[in-house]
Image (cartoon, coloured by chain):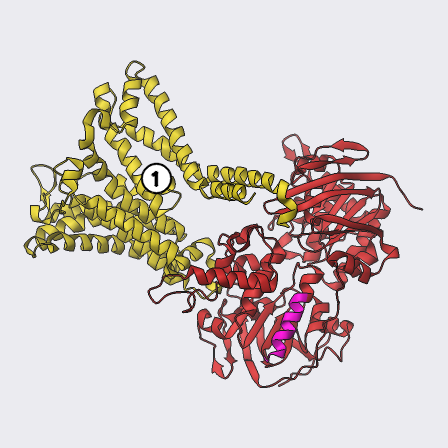
Chain colours: A red, B yellow
Amino acid sequence: MENTENIIEFRHITKRFPGIIACNDISLDIRKGEIHALLGENGAGKSTLMSILFGMYTPEEGTISIRGKEVKITNPRIATELGIGMVHQHFKLVQNYTVLQNIVLGSETVKGPFLDMDSCRKKVVELSEKYGLAVDPDALIENITVGQQQRCEILKMLYREAEILIFDEPTAVLTPQEIDELMDIMKGLANEGHTILFISHKLEEIKRVSDRVTILRRGKLVKTLNAADTTTTQMGELMVGREVSFHVEKKPAEPKEVVLDVQHLTMVNEETKKKIVNDVSFNVRRGEIVAIAGIDGNGQSELIYGLTGIMPINEGKITISGVDYTKKSIRERNLIMSHIPEDRHKYGLILDYPLSYNLALKNYFKPDFVSKAGFLKFGKFDTYADDLIERFDIRSGQGKVTMARSMSGGNQQKAIVAREIDQNADLLVAVQPTRGLDVGAIEFIHKQLVAQRDQDKAVLLMSFELDEVMDVADRILVMFEGEIMGNLDPKKVTVEEVGLYMAGVKREEKHE
Amino acid sequence: MSAKKEKKRDFSKYTGVLSSLIAIISGIIIALIVLMTTHPDKGFAAFTTLITGGFGMGGIKNLGSLFYFATPILCTGVAMCLAFQAGIFNIGGPGQYSVGALAAILTSLYFSKDFPAPFTWIVPLIVATLAGALWALVPGILKAYFNVNVVIGTIMFNYIEMYYMMHWINDYCYDAMKGQTRAIPAQCKLPQWFMPALTQNKTSDIGILIAILVAILIWIVMEKTQLGYELKACGKNAEASRYAGIKSKRNIMISILLSGALCGLGGGLTHLSVSGTYITMKEALAAEGFNGIAVCCLANNSPLGAIFGALFMAFLTVGGNYMQIFGFQREIVSVITSVIIYFAAFSLFLKQALERTANKKKTEVNKVTGEELK
């Protein structure tokens, strides 16, 4: 039974930003009760379109009709009143409030001047049972998993009686099991008559959960398809505008001498005295990509920070190309090791510096970039930036003078990848290098990683994306609660097996 | 089309200057209202004098006073620009300024008066600069190595300076008859060169030239050198700077010491000036220190802008000296400068608003050429 009643009608929506047309004459109908996926590369305009629907941007041209009536959504409050709710990519929750407090925040039920938490609780519990959103209402946000936080966000929308639910890349932060659960929840919501708009890069998920899918490319609507009638390959091609390969083409690795050698590395949280990284030993050789896999929060990030010198280590020894780097400064490490950091806004970029300054962040002190007297050679800054922008296809409004802050996330990431790969260091540490990127950009970055390997560099990849790890790595180290559980060969293990190591169920005998 | 686009880009480049101008104009309008409501009959005449900086009444001779008042606040203003750009909120200007002043007085009274020619004034000036830096040293160490809030550190040092200085003045350079510091020997005062001829004021000296030179120098350091690149990077994103291998502790120390040194230099220049000034024994922080923050606000953190900001503030001060003729208290000028500073504090907000408008205009242009841009 197909419901063809349109709940949302976008008509000729156009939205411009400096140097770019984010949405270009987009007309789209969303049917009541469907799960409608929006697919597109970074900067294709899908997030902008949803932000327009949620009242965070106003379009320059075009109209939106909700339930057949034309509306002007100038701020999120109006959107909420129209029954539109949004789960943002980065959750908007108060960390030291409970789940219940977060859900009711802003629309509390009151009895006189007092909060009526009991009736709030009743409503929340009802909702969570009805839609299978299991979460403890009295748990503090800071103590629950990302998946539970997301459920809390969904409950927040339902509590406000939202009928149209927007999910902005909801699976990016979840483990495979949590993704399955979310898919079930979404289907349940749709069956109850909710309309779901679902932004994603992940073709598999779209195919699995959505009824229809709309593909956007560079601000324009390419096509709307029935998810059942299409294939992931077709969707991928429509999105990128050319054929893409989902599998990384690479020759078998030819590991040579050891570049990075880590022995008994231990890092302790000063407050809790807990060992975040517990006696970790491993090595990375020239000509191989070693991946660290694991569920977020099992010490991988800290391990990388310890390696790169950003966090102090308590015990252990780090040797790179035969030299002891345990006590070396970050600057000294940077000369032999490039680092694509996990958090691109916190570490990777100086957002209020122009792109050219950011691209020179690891080089500005080298003789090419600065005279003996300490004056910067701006000519070199410019030619270097232009070169990287061209080679790595970094797109921005005004080229090298664009402030990093005003660039799209994907292009910010490309800028960092360009800078780090161009360091030509013996060891490349890439942390979540493709997070938030689209298929085309992911393919590009994976190729770059493999190319580094083939040039006899040692590559250490840390990623929460199991597919990425399986595809790109020549060797997988799985971390669980600060320890390495296994040293696996991706050609010999299945995803499910790696999952068991990640969950701490399985463990290899101590090696080396 | 490209010419038109170029023009728009220029507009967005100048939003900083524009926002400062709007702050000044809004401040002046409020000044008019204040003057008119206090003494409606003489208000307008007073206003004209104020906004002509007293040049209408005092003539060209006021140029000397203008430079005299601009010198200290230019130094402290540049000091604040440097610190703020490096992400250090140095509120210790008054202390660092006064320590510089006292160091200059003591050095000239006890040591440099017998030195050979140019060193009579150069040495006290250098000592003043070092003293200012020294006064920023402890808050700097506390910030860099113990992560103590720099605002608190520097403010507390203002008060330590205020009381400690009384003790020093009392013991070493107090002129009990006049209730102020002793006059410094004539040979220790700054040289005058062509300044008296230029300003037609026989007490004019090269203080303002040194201050302007220093402002330009600091601008070059911040915009053109590796040190400036690192200092600003730390100010904008300390974590990313650390990731890039920049030593943040070292940079905190450099920026706060330089900032303190500039304040100290300001104190030295003022108290070595030919027109002469004295420190009196009173429990008050030096206004020149705080006015530096105002200059920096007006200048949008640019050392070059600070030159104009300082000259403008001094211009108002000169005009304010004539206020008594119209039956106003001299302090009315403080009210007006405060209002302007108040608006200058909005200048960041104004700047953003202007940038938004500029961008909007730019998008209008892109509308026509949107396809090309893609």
Q: Position of residue B123 (x, y in %)?
A: 15, 55
Does residue A69 sit above or below A459 in this rendering? above
Residue at x 84% of width, y 50% of height: A188
> For the magenta stretch, what is the residue range?
A444-456
Tell me the element at label 1: helix
Image quarter for residue B245? bottom left
Residue that numbered label 1 is attached to? B294
Residue at x 52% of width, y 39% of height: B358
How packed mark 1 is, by other alpha carbons closer than 10 Å (few <14, some 14-19, many 20 or more), is many
Left or right: where A452 falls relative to A54: left
Left or right: where A303 falls relative to B87: right
Image quarter for residue B74? top left
User: What amino acid is labelled 1 in the image?
Assistant: Ala
Q: Position of residue A265 (x, y in %)?
A: 54, 76
Left or right: where B321 falls relative to A213: left
Q: Disc count in the image?
A: 1
